[in-house]
């Protein structure tokens, strides 16, 4: 009989929401809740830090993300991530914007010392969780049942998309997660 | 052609489509991308961006159609695609033709189209600025 494994400690990921435009199909609360449900399966709690509306006139309708490549940010991404924000080191900034150029639901390319992602108003229920996956170090897969599907989270047929053990290991090893402080 | 179409549509369905992977299909994808310009704005927006990344002479017909679209969203994404095209295109004729189309986008009624067109124009080589209607850099 297999020995029961030691309980894994709960880890916390803290995110901060910056809103330039509200999503069209799901509320931000619904997306955060969806992310909580997915990451709970990995023993990770998503904690919502600050929520703030910001206005950058020329990013009101479109934010250019180019090919969404880490290390090759566009001037729009540079501008977005340079907005002064009291986000503690190691916590994640999520920018909700109107549309992305080119067309995407989200993009997790971010400056090295400012982990974060940009979410378009076309996002699905699972886009936030998917982009957080990229921020935490996991990439696309060709399986529509999994969170990191490259075929679009809109097509996920499950109540909660899957994170497989190898992905959970990567997520839990992310330096962005911290252990829950015991009271 | 059907296989390419299927591949492109699968890529476009992603939350952040891997447009570089789509562009790796090369000029063989251009006829399919041209057809996709008749589809909805989302599909056409993705098609025009991939055409820009492929940056072959045949891309320009697709980019020109995007520039002439009634949809400001598609014109914005076309202007964005021009920047990718200009970073990759090498033929002087292509660059000249691109310069002419970008000049029309710089005159667009929509301020976002003009903003993205301006960014594309900044990627034009200086010699194209000399013989088109662009202000000197």
Image: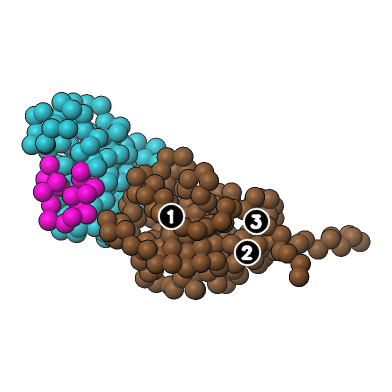
Q: Over which residues does the magenta segment extend?
A: B103-118
- Decide which of tag 1 and tag 2 comes sooner along the chain: 2
Disc 3 is attached to a residue of which chain? Answer: A
- Which of label 1 and label 2 is nearer to you? 1
Alpha-carbon distance for marks 1 and 3?
Answer: 23 Å
- A102 and B46: which is toward the camera: A102
Query: Of helix, strand and loop, which one carries label 2?
Result: helix
Alpha-carbon distance for marks 3 and 2?
Answer: 12 Å
Relative to A157, say whether B67 is above or below. Answer: above
How far across and how far down the image is residue B81, in percent?
27, 44
Q: Which label is found at residue B65? A: none
In this rendering, does residue A146 appear at all? yes
How far across and how far down the image is residue B117, in percent?
20, 45
Alpha-carbon distance for marks 1 and 2?
Answer: 28 Å
Disc 2 is attached to a residue of which chain? Answer: A
Q: How is colour applied across the structure in the image?
A: by chain
Please report the residue visible at 35 percent of the width from the left and 66 percent of the height from the top.
A21
In this rendering, position of residue A62 left or right of residue A116: left
- Decide which of tag 1 and tag 3 comes sooner along the chain: 1
**Disc 3 target residue:** A177
**What secondary structure do most residues of the magenta stretch adopt?**
helix
- Colour chosen for chain B: cyan
Query: Of helix, strand and loop, which one carries label 1?
Result: loop
Q: Which label is found at residue A39? A: 2
Query: Of helix, strand and loop, which one carries label 3?
Result: loop
**Disc 1 target residue:** A84
């Amino acid at each position: 009989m297999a020995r029961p494994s030691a309980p894994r400690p709960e880890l916390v990921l803290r995110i901060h929401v910056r809103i330039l435009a509200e999503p069209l199909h799901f509320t931000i609360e619904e997306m955060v809740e969806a992310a909580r449900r997915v990451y709970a399966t990995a023993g990770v709690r998503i904690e919502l830090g600050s929520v703030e509306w910001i206005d950058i006139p020329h990013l009101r309708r479109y934010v250019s993300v180019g090919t969404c490549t880490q290390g090759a940010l566009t001037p729009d991404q540079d501008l977005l991530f340079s907005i002064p924000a009291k986000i503690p080191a190691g916590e994640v900034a999520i920018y909700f914007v109107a549309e992305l150029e080119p067309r995407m639901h989200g993009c997790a390319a971010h400056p090295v010392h400012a982990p974060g992602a940009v979410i378009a108003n076309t996002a699905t229920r699972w886009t936030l969780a998917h982009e957080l996956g990229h921020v935490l170090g996991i990439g696309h897969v060709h399986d529509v049942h999994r969170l990191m599907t490259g075929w679009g989270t809109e097509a996920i047929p499950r109540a909660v998309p899957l994170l497989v053990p190898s992905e959970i290991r990567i997520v839990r090893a992310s330096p962005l997660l911290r252990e829950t402080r015991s009271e | 052609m059907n296989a390419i179409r299927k591949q492109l549509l699968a890529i476009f369905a992603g939350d952040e489509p891997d447009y570089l992977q789509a562009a790796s299909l090369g000029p063989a994808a251009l006829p399919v991308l041209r057809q996709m310009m008749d589809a909805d704005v989302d599909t056409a927006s993705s098609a025009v961006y991939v055409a820009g990344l492929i940056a072959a002479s045949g891309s320009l017909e697709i980019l020109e159609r995007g520039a002439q679209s009634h949809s400001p969203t598609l014109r914005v994404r076309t202007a964005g695609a021009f920047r990718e095209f200009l970073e990759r295109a090498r033929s002087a004729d292509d660059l000249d033709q691109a310069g002419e189309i970008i000049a029309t986008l710089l005159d667009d009624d929509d301020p976002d189209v003009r903003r993205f067109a301006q960014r594309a124009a900044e990627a034009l080589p200086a010699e194209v600025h000399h013989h088109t209607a662009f202000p000197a850099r």
